[in-house]
Amino acid sequence: GTAKAFKKDIEKLKKDGCKKLIIDLRGNTGGIMQEGINCADILLPKSKIIEVKERDGKKKVYSSDEKNIGIECVLAVDEYTASASEIFAYAIKDNGRAKLVGSKTFGKGVIQGIYDLG
């Protein structure tokens, strides 16, 4: 539910007159990949968020749609910014929607999955 809460909070801030955000991802060790992708989609116009290469060599591209919340932001990161928070941060940065400030992120590079067991 991170993306849903994120969108709700940004919409409230915008309603209250906020024009720019500082999003502090320092110490955020990640979470579920899809939530990071969904949060990026909230801030991005139509663009590529991330390309994932599976073990079998297949590639999957995750993209945002044309809808976005239209707010400027700066993202604070550090060596503990990892996983889904890195996906979010670099998707926003790489698509020219925000600058990153702070230090180099963790650089995990591996995505785990959640699977239901019978």
Image: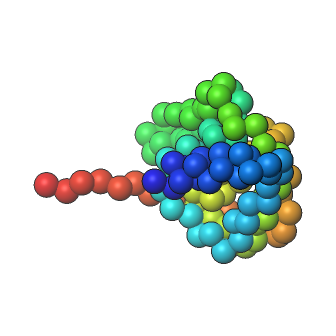
Q: Residue at x 29, y 53 (%)?
A: 115
Q: Residue furthest front?
A: 16
Residue 108 appears in which quarter of the rendering?
bottom right
Query: Percent x, y for residue 100?
Result: 83, 57
Residue 23 in sight from this viewpoint: yes
Q: Residue at x 45, y 53 (%)?
A: 1
Query: Percent x, y for residue 38?
Result: 55, 43
Q: Residue at x 58, y 60 (%)?
A: 83
| Picture colour scheme | rainbow
Residue 108 in sight from this viewpoint: no
Q: Is residue 84 above or below residue 24?
A: above
- Give the total number of marks visible in the rendering: 0
Query: Percent x, y for residue 86?
Result: 66, 57
Foreground pick, 44 / 34: 44
Query: Percent x, y for residue 17?
Result: 80, 49
Residue 46 appears in which quarter of the rendering?
top right
Q: Is residue 10 above or below residue 83?
A: above
Q: Residue at x 86, y 63 (%)?
A: 101
Foreground pick, 64 / 106: 64
Q: Is residue 79 above or below residue 66?
A: below
Q: Is residue 10 left or right of residue 30?
A: right
Q: Is residue 37 above or below residue 67?
A: below
Q: Is residue 4 left or right of residue 102?
A: left
Q: Residue furthest left?
A: 118
Foreground pick, 64 / 55: 64
The quarter of the image holding the C terminus is bottom left
Residue 70 appears in which quarter of the rendering?
top right
